[in-house]
């Protein structure tokens, strides 16, 4: 994997490219940013370039390090993660890390450690890591990947060069999902709810998302055509199973959110042109509809299920009907 294979994070990749080109990598790098945005993928690409035997600042793709089988442990790369059935990284693991990194590299002149998530380091473990960061062996680098960098001691953070990561755009998240073979419509709607995190979107079931997107698309077409029974039919169709109901609500929320963005002047490809049934609504009504849909979703997800989910869905959708839309413009 190379930086060019990774969607987004242009600034972080630019910083790391300069670091590699200068051949003066700090002992520690702290990759910080929201969960699921791609920090680990960038860390993997950085380490691959760092361990390349040609030391040119980018993986050559030909040397023994670059062609090492991806499914096998690299002799000069160590990954430190919480032990099975534990949520934290213990001091013994850090001691093993320090002993390992002090050994002579098996290939070339460099070694690399990836600690993910670094937020899982306990206080004793973090303090033990500090000594290695203060006196790093030549040619070594430790990459800490953290969604909550503030949980690390200030002394550890001060010994690392921080590389910041932000959320991806909806369009970038959708592209990541399409690369994972998600259907275009499902990817677009899931991206609208992912808050810039492809990892969050990928945690969902793409097939369920596509079914939900199709159901919502059909609903909005029927509403635009003046079908007064569309809302009730939609509620009858998806109001039984919790997973289907939540997925359909999420797809509806994504459509309303994109329509609100469009109404407020966002004409980007990610927002797109909303369906006619939503395009007729004014910004105030779209925001009200979005708030009501989010509240219903919160109740269902939290176990505070309304006595009649089908009725709640039908009531939510009633003002979107072709007959009532004009009242909300």
Image (cartoon, rainbow, N blue to C red):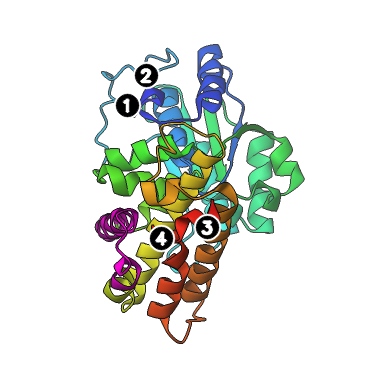
Numbered disc 1: secondary structure: loop
Instruction: Tell me what residue is drawn at x 49 percent, y 39 percent.
Output: 262
Q: Which residues are magenta?
A: 206-233
Residue denoted by label 2 = 53
Quick one: 124 or 205, which is closer to the camera? 205
The residue at which mark 1 appears reads as: 65
Q: Nearer the viewer, mark 3 or mark 1?
A: 3
Where residue 206 sits: x, y (%)? 28, 54
Asked whether residue 128 is drawn in magenta, I would say no
Q: CA distance from mark 1 to mark 4?
A: 66 Å
What is the x, y in percent for residue 220? 33, 55
Q: Are marks 2 and 1 in contact (CB under 8 Å)?
A: yes
Q: Main secondary structure of the magenta part?
A: helix
Q: Which residue is mark 4?
A: 323
Q: Which mark is residue 327?
A: 3
The x and y percentages for residue 260 are 52, 46
**CA gap, disc 2 and disc 3:** 68 Å
Which element type, helix, strand or loop, lies under badge 3?
helix
For marks 3 and 1, the one nearer the N-term is 1
Measured in 3D between alpha carbons, the distance from the residue under mark 2 to the one under mark 1, in whole angstroms, is 7 Å
């Amino acid at each position: 994997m190379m930086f060019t294979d990774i969607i987004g994070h242009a600034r972080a990749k630019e910083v790391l490219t300069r670091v590699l080109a200068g051949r003066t990598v700090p002992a520690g790098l702290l990759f910080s940013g929201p969960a699921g945005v791609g920090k680990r993928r960038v860390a993997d690409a950085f380490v691959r370039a760092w361990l390349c035997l040609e030391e040119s600042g980018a993986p050559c793709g030909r040397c023994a390090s670059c062609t090492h089988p991806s499914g096998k442990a690299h002799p000069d790369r160590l990954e430190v993660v919480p032990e099975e059935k534990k949520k934290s990284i213990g001091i013994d693991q850090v001691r093993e890390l320090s002993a390992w990194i002090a050994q002579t590299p098996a290939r070339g002149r460099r070694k690399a450690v990836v600690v993910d998530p670094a937020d899982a380091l306990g206080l004793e473990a973090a303090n033990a890591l500090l000594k290695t960061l203060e006196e790093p062996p030549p040619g070594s680098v430790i990459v800490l990947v953290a969604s909550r960098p503030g949980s690390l001691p200030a002394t550890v953070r001060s010994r690392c060069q921080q590389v910041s990561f932000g959320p991806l755009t909806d369009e970038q998240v959708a592209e990541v999902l399409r690369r994972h073979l998600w259907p275009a419509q499902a990817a677009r709607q899931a991206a609208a709810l992912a808050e810039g995190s492809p990892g969050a979107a990928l945690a969902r079931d793409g097939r369920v998302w596509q079914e939900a997107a199709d159901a919502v698309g059909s609903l909005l077409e029927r509403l635009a055509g003046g079908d007064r029974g569309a809302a009730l039919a939609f509620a009858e169709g998806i109001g039984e199973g919790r997973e289907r109901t939540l997925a359909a609500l999420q797809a509806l929320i994504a459509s309303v959110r994109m329509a609100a963005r469009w109404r407020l002047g966002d004409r980007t490809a990610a927002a797109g042109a909303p369906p006619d049934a939503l395009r007729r609504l004014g910004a105030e009504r779209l925001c009200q509809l979005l708030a009501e849909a989010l509240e219903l979703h919160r109740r269902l997800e939290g176990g505070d299920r309304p006595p009649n989910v089908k009725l709640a869905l039908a009531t939510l959708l009633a003002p979107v009907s072709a007959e009532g839309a004009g009242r909300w413009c």
